[in-house]
Image (spheres, helix red, strand yellow):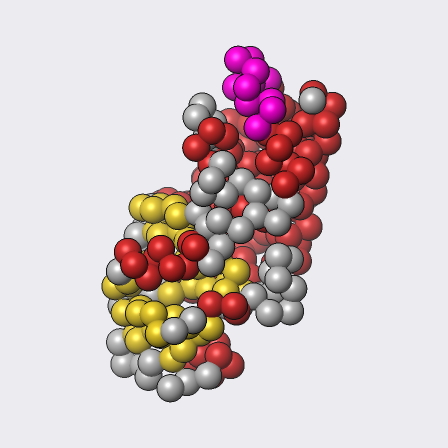
Amino acid sequence: MASLPAYKEKYRVMQTESSLHPGSARALYIGHQRPCHVRMEGQALVIQCTHMAECSVPLRHIARIHLSTRVDMSLQVLARCTRRGIPVVVADPQGEIILRALGREGIDEGLRLRLQRLSQDFEWPARFDNWHRAQMMRATRIAIRRLGWEGNADTVRSTEQRSRNELSRHLGKRTAHRVVKQWHSLTLAWMQAALQEHGIDARSDAWVNDHIDLASSLAAPLERQLLPLLLQWAANQENPAPETIWQTLIDLFEGRHQTIERTGRDLLNRLHRWLVEND
């Protein structure tokens, strides 16, 4: 059975360091290139993909899991992962998110407690919406400045449309549509794992998300600020084969994980400051 380093080499699975377990736990992507079967043996996932030797990945080495719908994995295995605090996102080949499963091991209770108190206010959704719009405008201004685009930085919708047009110009309309969904699933999976570190896990997600999908809401300004990264990647693609898009996006996302971590943590810090001011 293959070891963890051999798995990384054979499957081209990017496994970058997690701030939750630095130096040990990594992001794990399975099934985006070929069908796979996943089972549990002891405290490890055993992964068998078509035309590949099976390999074992200890749960302690996994920070979050991003699965394709082409992966055959039982609910029992999924439950074992989440009980160990490993959040899971499942997406189809088009990038559409099918399932989000939260773990149960948040280590920083401060953000969770402040969110819980604020969510008891009946004006909570409107107040959060105002904050969220401000974050979208801020992220849009940053993206426009880095892209060198002219125009009103506050027009969030027009920036979104222009970015989609740019992606379509480089990749074709159909591929661009798929890339937008796939990129969203990657940023959402990161944000879900980051929120779990702050205690927004399976125990508290229900009351936080009663009116607001917090992970999706926070993933939106993160995606917007990372827009220059995605558009630069698209401009460098030359007739990309549809079956390789997923892996090249994963390579991009994990290859720039330090930028993404810094941007995402900055957003969460601004949320925390806002909660402190409104507590």
x, y percent for residue 214: 51, 34
x, y percent for residue 61: 52, 69
Q: Quadrant of residue 279?
A: top right
> Camera-side residue: 256 or 210?
210
Specify the farthest residue to the bottom: 1
In the rendered view, does 17 fall on the left or right side of 248? right
Q: Quadrant of residue 155?
A: top right
Query: Residue sitting at 26 percent across and 60 percent down?
Result: 74
* Span shown in magenta: 116-129
Q: Is residue 261 visible to the viewer in this orientation of the structure?
A: yes
How many numbered callouts? Answer: 0
Query: Residue sitting at 30 percent across and 52 percent down?
Result: 92
Q: Is residue 141 visible to the viewer in this orientation of the structure?
A: no
x, y percent for residue 96: 34, 46
Q: Quadrant of residue 156?
A: top right
- Residue 176 in the image: above or below residue 20: above
> Camera-side residue: 249 or 39?
39
Q: Main secondary structure of the magenta part?
A: helix
Q: Is residue 76 magenta?
A: no
x, y percent for residue 174: 32, 47
Specify the farthest residue to the top: 122
> Camera-side residue: 154 or 219?
219
Identify the image quadrant of the N terminus: bottom left
Query: Residue sitting at 53 percent across and 13 percent down?
Result: 122
> Camera-side residue: 261 or 194?
194
Query: Residue sitting at 60 percent across and 69 percent down?
Result: 24
